[in-house]
Image: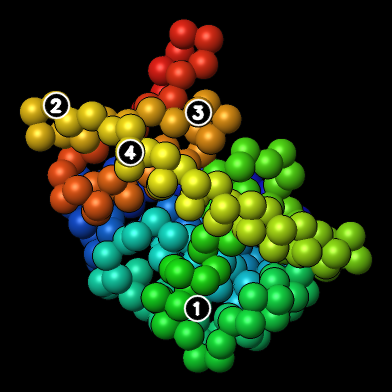
Amino acid sequence: EINNTFKNFINPKNASENINGLKNLSTGGIVFYLIREFAKKSKKINLKNYLVLSALTTISDSMDLIGDNRVIVSYGLDLIFETDLVSFNTLLDKIDFKKYPDEKDVAFKVIPVINSFGRLDCSEDFISYIIDDSLESICFVDKIIDINKQRKKISDNLKKIIETSTKEVNNVVFGIIPFEYNGFLGFISSHLSSKFNKASLVFSKNNGIVHC
């Protein structure tokens, strides 16, 4: 355990100047650099694992791949098959993830699987399972795959429904989806913007509370 290693930690995003380009880091990149400092005090920390996870979060957040973001993603993808994250490796095997991937491979094949948890508001903690090597967690990978299949079906159905029920006001496209699919708001809004080449707002409503 590492206690009282740092008295202060400054988030580079809050700095007035873009020191060493760190202001462009994703949150995952900031966490990685913090863990890297912890690793100097503890040999138990496998930095490969965190570098790969940081690369995934950088791509997932659609960060500009410049400066340290590019370095993290480049090295993280080089090491994606070299972690000791048994459950994560099992997931890559289950989705037939190819060797020598680039950021597009991750964005279109890995990230949607991970994000399916949030979209369907699943209670399980995805990360706690994926970094665990217990038999329970390895078996949990099959559930992850099933949840992603559900996500694909719901996404396709919502796209069909929303495209025929939208309204346009002042060159902005508006749509409403059922509250139980609240996790799809951003996805559907992005789809409408791409489909109609216009700004869009998608809402859901529950007990008088509107989400957007």
| Residue 2 visible, this orientation | no
Coloration mode: rainbow
Camera-near label (2 vs 4) is: 4
At x 76%, y 64%, the residue is 141
Q: Secondary structure at mark 4?
A: loop
At x 57%, y 53%, the residue is 153
As displayed, is residue 170 above or below residue 72?
A: above
Q: Secondary structure at mark 3?
A: loop
Tell which circle, 1 or 4, labels the residue nearer the N-terminal end: 1
Residue 6's x, y, as percent? Answer: 54, 50
As displayed, is residue 78 above or below residue 33?
A: below
Label of residue 76 in the image: 1
Residue type at mark 4: give it. Thr
Residue 121's x, y, as percent? Answer: 62, 38
Residue indicated by mark 4: 164
Residue 22's x, y, as percent? Answer: 30, 61
- Measure the C-alpha gap from mark 1 to mark 3: 38 Å
Residue 194's x, y, as percent? Answer: 24, 53
Tell which circle, 1 or 3, labels the residue nearer the N-terminal end: 1
Residue indicated by mark 2: 169
**Dot 1 crowding, Cα within 10 Å, few <14, some 14–19, many 20+:** many
